[in-house]
Image (cartoon, grey):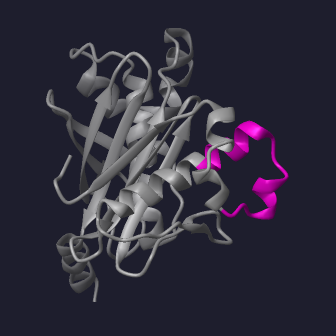
Amino acid sequence: MPHDIALAGLDLPETAVLGSAEATGVPLPPAIADARPIRRAHYVAGRLCARRALARLGIDHMPSRRDDATADWPEGYAGSISHTAGYAVAVAARRAAYASLGIDVEQPLSAALEADLAPLVLTPAERDRFARHDVVHLVTLAFSIKEAVFKALWPLTRVRFEPEDVELIELGAQGAVTVRLVRSLDRRWTAGACLPGLWRRDVARCLCLAWVARETWMMRSDAAR
């Protein structure tokens, strides 16, 4: 994890999250307030993680929810939130260093489901590239990395794209990953553009992070003019 990106995670027994004193400080949008307890617990846990990550950067802020369902990060900060069954996580960083962040957490899929979803998640080039590497839960990992990339690029482009529109070109043994765009999203983010990231996997979950450094964003903005 880069030293200037703050991460906070939280295990998610819903009764413990919703019944905590900290949870009372999380305002719930109408769509969340009327949801089932588990959905409320996911939302609250994600916001608590976001607040803790920001606190590690020296700022006290609880991100609210924008109309497009993204988190409202404070001026000068970038961040991302994710949750899966039993766990929530958030990252935050100063915009002086990072234009955007994306994080995703997933539970490992079964082998049968990975086989069914592989054609939707992996490009033919990825299947060829990693066929000899015997990567455990490759489909789960690829989906999570691509979701993290989407979260990192969405605030900068507002362009939606599918898993086949990006591909993994490197999976480092120490958790480093490089992802490349297969199709152009806009003048800044054209086919062939690469993003760095990190991945971590254990028996319970797969956690992936992607980011756009501010320097990269500035260079691409200048090149697009």
SS majority, magenta:
helix
The residue sitting at 52% across, 53% down in the picture is: 48
Quadrant in the rendering for residue 131? top left
User: In the rendered image of this protein, does residue 48 appear above or below residue 213?
Assistant: above
Front residue (pair 197, 47): 47
Q: Residue furthest right?
A: 34
Residue 111's spot in the image, x, y percent?
49, 10
Q: Nearer the viewer, residue 62 or 90?
A: 62
Q: Is residue 155 above or below residue 126?
A: below
Q: Is residue 146 visible?
A: yes
* Percent of width and height locating residue 92: 35, 61
Q: How many marks?
A: 0
In the rendered structure, the answer to whether residue 147 lies left or right of residue 220 reads: right
**Residue lying furthest front:** 21
Q: Residue at x 62, y 61 (%)?
A: 25
Q: Is residue 106 left or right of residue 40?
A: left
| Relative image position of residue 161 (x, y in whole percent) | 51, 55
Residue 36: say if magenta: yes
**Boundaries of the magenta span:** 27-44
Asked if residue 123 shows in the view, the reply is: no
Extreme-top residue of the structure: 112
Residue at the image point whose x is 81% and y is 62% from the top = 30
Rendered-image quadrant of the C terminus: bottom left
Q: Is residue 41 magenta?
A: yes
Residue 54 percent coordinates (x, y): 37, 63
Q: Quadrant of residue 130?
A: top left
Of 55 and 38, the residue lying toward us: 55
25 above or below 59? above
